[in-house]
Amino acid sequence: MEHTEIKYIDGKRFSAQNRTHTIIIDQPKEGGGDDQGPTPPEIFVDALGSCIGVYVLAFCKNTGLNPDDMKIILEWGKASDKPARIKSINVKIDLPNANVGARKAALLKVAESCLIHETIKHEPEITIDLANVTKRA
């Protein structure tokens, strides 16, 4: 099983440790943070977009399409009702140097099969509990 550790720093800032990489997560100034990193929902959307990018890149390499200058553009919005959540995500894949042509359907199918997209579609089991609970005097 993989392991990630999120540590509270100060204010509304956290660090996420993955293998040897650290990402700072913060809230914007209008949300009470110092805007020193992306918010958790932004990282969630970033993870989806970069995962799609990895799968599209592999498709391009396997089919001879040119991935140079590829962009994955995501527009997303939060729900206005409860519970708080991301309500919609629209993804556009820009391959300005590739003639996708008849491979469009296959490319989109590959993009939709990325790990993060499949995880969202199949609602993972998530358990939340306290770690090392001890009584304090």
Image (spheres, rainbow, N blue to C red):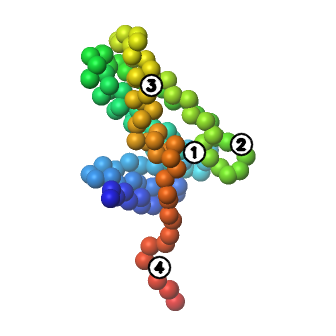
Q: Amino acid at mark 4?
A: Val
**Disc nearer the start of the sequence (4/1):** 1
- How many neighbours does mark 3 have within 10 angstroms: few (below 14), some (14-19), or many (20 or more)? some
Q: Amino acid at mark 3?
A: Leu
Give how far across and how far down residue 93 sits, in percent: 45, 22
Is residue 39 something one can see in this rendering?
no
Question: In which quadrant of the rendered view does residue 7 lie?
Answer: bottom left
In this rendering, the label closer to the viewer, 3 or 4: 3
- Residue 105 in the figure: left or right of residue 3: right
- How many neighbours does mark 2 have within 10 angstroms: few (below 14), some (14-19), or many (20 or more)? few
In this rendering, the label closer to the viewer, 1 or 3: 3
In this rendering, the label closer to the viewer, 4 or 1: 4
* Residue linked to disc 3: 108
How far, Cα to Cα, is label 2 from label 1? 21 Å
Q: Are marks 2 and 1 in contact (CB under 8 Å)?
A: no
Q: Are marks 1 and 3 in contact (CB under 8 Å)?
A: no
* Residue linked to disc 1: 29
**Disc nearer the start of the sequence (2/4):** 2
